[in-house]
């Protein structure tokens, strides 16, 4: 057990929770947030891709349903 772990173990639960939230805030300040235009573009790309996948899965389901009905009547 190293020295840092011993120091963290000796802190109370509220001190550890406070440390956690301070570290979260520090990390969030490092994030490069997208611009409104980038966010709109990314959202559009995701929605188009999801729509395409829905279309592919629906067509595959339709074809497999027809094949099953042909085989099993």
Image (cartoon, rainbow, N blue to C red):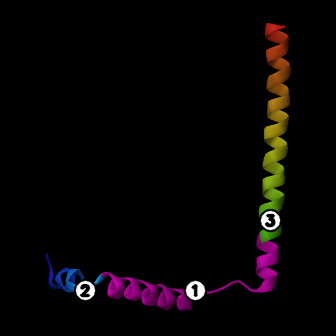
- Which callout, 1 or 3, points to the residue nearer the camera? 1
Residue found 85% across the figure and 44% down from its top: 55
Total residue callouts: 3
61 or 17: nearer the viewer: 17
Mark 2 is surrounded, within 10 Å at the Cα level, by few (under 14), some (14 to 19) or many (20 or more) other residues, namely few
Residue 22 located within the stretch drawn in magenta: yes
Does the magenta stretch mainly form a helix, a strand or a loop? helix
Where does label 1 land, which residue? 31
Where does label 2 land, which residue? 11
Secondary structure, mark 2, is loop
Residue found 39% across the figure and 83% down from its top: 17
6 or 43: nearer the viewer: 6
Residue 10 placement, left or right of 70: left
Residue 53 in picture, x, y percent from top left: 78, 48
Task: Report, in whole angstroms, how far the alpha carbon at label 2 lies from the one at label 1.
Answer: 29 Å
> If you read the primary sequence from the N terminus, does the residue marked by circle 1 or circle 3 appear first?
1
Residue 70 placement, left or right of 3: right
Residue 30 in picture, x, y percent from top left: 53, 89
Task: Report, in whole angstroms, how far the alpha carbon at label 1 lies from the one at label 3.
Answer: 22 Å
Name the disc covering residue 45, or none.
3
Magenta highlight range: 13-42
């Amino acid at each position: 057990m190293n020295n840092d772990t011993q120091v963290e173990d000796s802190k109370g639960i509220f001190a550890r929770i406070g440390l956690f939230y301070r570290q979260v805030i520090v990390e969030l300040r490092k994030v490069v947030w997208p611009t409104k235009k980038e966010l709109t573009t990314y959202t559009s790309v995701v929605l188009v891709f999801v729509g395409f996948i829905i279309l592919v899965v629906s067509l595959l389901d339709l074809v497999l349903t027809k094949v099953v009905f042909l085989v099993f009547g």
